[in-house]
Image: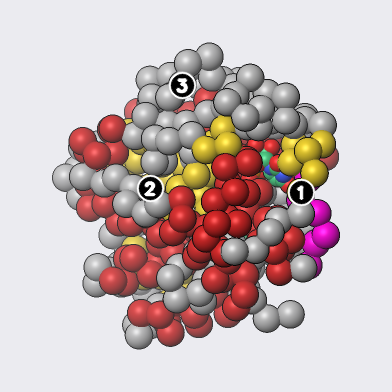
């Protein structure tokens, strides 16, 4: 059985679908701080399989031990964290408390229960604003520009240090920009309140929930002046987690950082234009000043994932955008 922390969230829910499709049994721990129980019902609907579930906060170590006693856990995928870069600047302690303490508890738990297979949700944010793109796993890990970003850098360091003192196999998956939704339209990215990320904002403008998309900066040194990112379909990303769990079964006993992206950079305007093309809906947008802290351009060299995990992204930008739109149309309220 695989323990998926934060399994009711955006990436976790898609990963559980892929784990169940590969006949893994799944135990979810989530406190619904940024998700809803309905995501777990949707997963069961999509797969026709059931999942075990504990509603709890991972920061409660005694409860973690107590509630998981009856489950035979082979591996852990640790998604649970807060993820808003902007909020982390205003509430740094909230981010360090949750993202670091949850990780420490799950690593203590791993040792306590003699689990040797660990997958961690890291981020391309660890590369900061890179001088050379695409970034490889050997590119410099920067100091971190927000408490959120730092919590991922520190998280990776904690895993490395712990691995030097205790034997287990770990993969730090450095995601680029996950977008899109499951083909069923039943699960997807559903931010509460005003979206921070580009795609939910675009789909909310398309459906009429918001009036205008603000494009942050049109004067970058990029082909069309807007920022470049490596957008990756969440279903592709989800499948990489299954491959990582399978790879760790080889007991390599190391910590391996692996980039997960498509290897292509797309600009904000390219996203808007492609969205308009696949949906035939016009997006009302305005080019505004740059957003503080934005990296002008980043995309990943993702050859290591292919070499080690046998995984590479399959789905196109069109697939990402049409699935995101399909999900938005299905959201009730
Ligand atoms: P999400 O917010 O949708 O999912 C996180 C889940 O963890 C939520 O269901 C939330 O309720 C749960 N959670 C948070 N703190 C918890 C706690 N203390 N105890 C129990 N449950 C808790 O986020 P996501 O987009 O699915 O991201 C998953 C992971 O991937 C996070 O670690 C995030 O930092 C990382 N990541 C996300 C992105 C992205 O753009 N979405 C990019 C890079 C890395
Ligand atoms: C994408 C592009 C914006 C919103 C963040 C985190 C990163 C990782 C992924 C977790 C940028 C532009 C956006 C809008 C816009 N998360 N944009 N108008 O900033 O690349 O990465 O999510 O680890 O750590 O920083 O993603 O979706 O916010 O922005 O023009 O309303 O869209 O400037 O170029 P970002 P994003």
Closest to the observer, 197 or 110? 197
* 280 up-or-down from 221: above or below: below
- Label 2 sits on a secondary structure element that is strand
Instruction: Tell me which residue sits at (33%, 56%) in the image.
Output: 239
> Do labels 1 and 2 touch, CB within 8 Å?
no
Q: Residue 162 at x, y = what percent?
A: 41, 34
Q: Is mark 3 within 8 Å of ligand 2?
A: no
Instruction: Tell me which residue sits at (21%, 36%) in the image.
Output: 307
Which of disc 2 and disc 3 is earlier in sequence? Answer: 2
Q: Residue 304 at x, y = what percent?
A: 28, 33
Q: Would you name the residue on which mark 2 appears?
A: 119
- Which dot marks residue 285? 1
Q: Residues within 10 Å of mark 1 (few under 14, many from 20)?
A: some
Closest to the observer, 106 or 206? 206
Q: Residue 223 at x, y = what percent?
A: 58, 26
- Which dot marks residue 316? none
Closest to the observer, 23 or 251? 23
Principal secondary structure, stretch drawn in magenta: loop
Q: Tell me how far mark 1 sits from mark 3, CA to CA.
A: 28 Å
Instruction: Tell me which residue sits at (45%, 68%) in the image.
Output: 182
Q: Tell me how far mark 1 sits from mark 2, CA to CA.
A: 38 Å
Q: Quadrant of residue 10?
A: bottom right
Q: Is residue 151 visible?
A: no
Q: Nearer the viewer, mark 1 or mark 2?
A: 1
Number of marks: 3
Which of disc 3 and disc 1 is earlier in sequence? Answer: 3
Image: magenta residue range: 209-214
Q: Is residue 311 visible?
A: yes
- Which dot marks residue 133? 3
Name the side, left or right, on which 25 lies relative to 262: left
């Amino acid at each position: 059985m695989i323990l998926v922390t934060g399994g009711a969230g955006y990436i976790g829910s898609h990963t559980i679908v892929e784990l169940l499709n590969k006949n893994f049994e799944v135990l979810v721990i989530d406190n619904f701080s940024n998700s809803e129980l309905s995501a777990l019902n949707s997963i069961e609907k999509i797969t026709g399989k059931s999942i075990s579930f504990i509603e709890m906060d991972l920061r409660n170590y005694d409860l973690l031990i107590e509630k998981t006693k009856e489950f035979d856990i082979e591996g852990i995928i640790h998604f649970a964290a807060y993820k808003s870069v902007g909020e982390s600047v205003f509430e740094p302690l909230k981010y360090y408390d949750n993202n670091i303490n949850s990780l420490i508890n799950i690593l203590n738990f791993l040792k306590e229960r003699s689990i040797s297979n660990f997958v961690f949700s890291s981020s391309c944010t660890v590369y900061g604003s890179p001088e050379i793109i695409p970034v490889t796993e050997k590119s410099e890990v920067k100091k971190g520009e927000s408490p959120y970003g730092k919590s991922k850098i520190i998280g990776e360091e904690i895993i490395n240090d712990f691995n030097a003192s205790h034997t287990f196999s770990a993969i730090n998956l450095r995601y680029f920009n996950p977008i899109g939704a499951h083909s069923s339209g039943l699960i997807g990215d559903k931010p509460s309140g005003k979206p921070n990320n580009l795609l939910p904002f675009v789909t909310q403008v398309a459906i009429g929930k918001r009036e205008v998309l603000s494009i942050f900066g049109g004067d970058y040194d990029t082909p069309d002046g807007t920022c470049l990112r490596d957008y990756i379909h969440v279903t592709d990303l989800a499948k990489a987690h299954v491959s990582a769990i399978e790879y760790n079964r080889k007991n390599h006993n190391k910590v391996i950082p692996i980039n997960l992206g498509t290897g292509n950079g797309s600009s904000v305007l390219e996203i808007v234009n492609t969205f308009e093309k696949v949906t035939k809906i016009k997006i009302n947008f305005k080019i505004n000043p740059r957003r503080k802290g934005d990296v002008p351009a980043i995309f990943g060299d993702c050859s290591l994932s292919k070499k080690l995990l046998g995984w590479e992204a399959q789905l196109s930008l069109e697939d990402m955008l049409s699935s995101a739109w399909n999900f938005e149309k299905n959201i009730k309220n």
